Every structure is written in structure tokens, then in C-alpha cells.
Amino acid sequence: MFKDLLANDPIAQEIAELGRDKDFWINKDPRSEILSTAISDQLSKERIAAKLSQGVFIDREIEDRYETQMKLKKKALNKALRASALFNSTAITVSNGYSSDVAAMLRSRYHSVTELVLRTNGRFSIRTVVPVSNQIAALFDGGGHPHAAGGNLHFTIPEQLAFRLTPYRLKKVRELIETASELSQS
């Protein structure tokens, strides 16, 4: 995008490179992790975007936001790991945040082919080795990229309550797991 809009702007190029580093999980520039983690809400997004536009990529405020968010992220990852399970080659867990990090943790832990990160409201994120995430998500009112996508199971209120008690026994969740396992094996 920077090539189309700001091709001669070195700050825009650096921002684009940082975004690519994080978005494609290249992880060569530690600033991409710091910035993506520090952005936690609309206010921090606006403040950090203003700093980036001035060429400020890391400062004390961004580092402080990063450290605060890392504590929350570590807590969420630990909770997600405790709630995780493996069905065939599909790792699954419940987490209301940090979907990409949770999915990466599941893949590392279980050497899975597919990772499902479910939210208590019925939304889910899916990552697959085989490029079928978007196909799976499309079957569940969603979309995305071949290796990363999301969808919605549209839980009713009773299903939300049942999900909190026994998340992997809920019919809609079992259907998602079965579909993901079948398509990921193809």
C-alpha cells in the first residue's frame, strides 16, 4: 500500500516493513512485536499511529504499554494452554484474545495441522497448515486467508452457557472440529 500511496516516504516504507514482519510471522524486527502488542485499544492505536507517522517507532510510552500487554498476553496464553485439547490433528482451545499467538502456541505444543481458537461468544479463529482455513471459515459464516481465517458459530444464550461448562461437547463446536479435521486432511 505504501508503494501506491507514499512511495517516496521512508517512514511509510518502514511502517509497511514492520507490518509485514508481524503479519507474515517473519519476526526479524523485534519492533514489530513490541508495536503490535502495545496496540491494545483504540486510544493506544491512535497514539502509536501518531508517533509512527512522525518516525517514532519505540519510546518509553510504547515500551510501557508493551510490558503491560505482555503480562496480560502471558496470562491469556497460559489460560488457553490449560483449556486446550487435541482432536486428531486439530488443536483447540478457548481464548478471548491473542488468537494468532494462541494458535502458534498450540501448533508448537501439539505439532497440530489445524488450530481452533474459540471465543465464548461463538466466534472463532482458525489456522491451518494446508491452505483451507478460509474454506472452513466460509462454512461457518466467516472468511479470511487460506492459512488463517475466522468465523462464527452463532451461539444462542443457552449454547453460550453450555459452552462455558463443557465447550468441546457442544454440537456446533463438534461440527466445527470435524469439518476442520476433514478439510485439513485433504
Image (cartoon, rainbow, N blue to C red):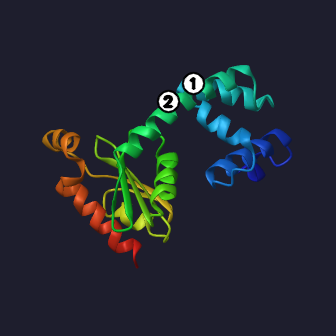
Q: Is residue 80 left or right of residue 50?
A: left
- In the rendered image of this protein, does residue 18 appear above or below residue 177? above
Callout 1–callout 2 Cβ contact below 8 Å: yes
Measured in 3D between alpha carbons, the distance from the residue under mark 1 to the one under mark 2, in whole angstroms, is: 7 Å
Residue 170 point in image, percent of width and height: 18, 52
Q: Secondary structure at mark 2?
A: helix
Residue 25 point in image, percent of width and height: 63, 54
Residue at 50% across, 68% down: 129
Q: Quadrant of residue 115?
A: bottom left
Q: Which mark is residue 125?
A: none
View extreme (bottom): residue: 186
Residue at 22% across, 40% down: 164
Q: Which mark is residue 68?
A: 1
Q: Secondary structure at mark 1?
A: helix
Question: What amino acid is at disc 1?
Answer: Thr
Residue 119 point in image, percent of width and height: 34, 43
Q: Nearer the viewer, residue 33 or 20?
A: 33
Quarter in which the C terminus is drawn: bottom left
Residue at 35% across, 66% down: 180
Callout 1 environment at 10 Å: few (<14), some (14 to 19), or many (20+)?
A: some
Callout 2 environment at 10 Å: few (<14), some (14 to 19), or many (20+)?
A: few
Q: Which mark is residue 72?
A: 2
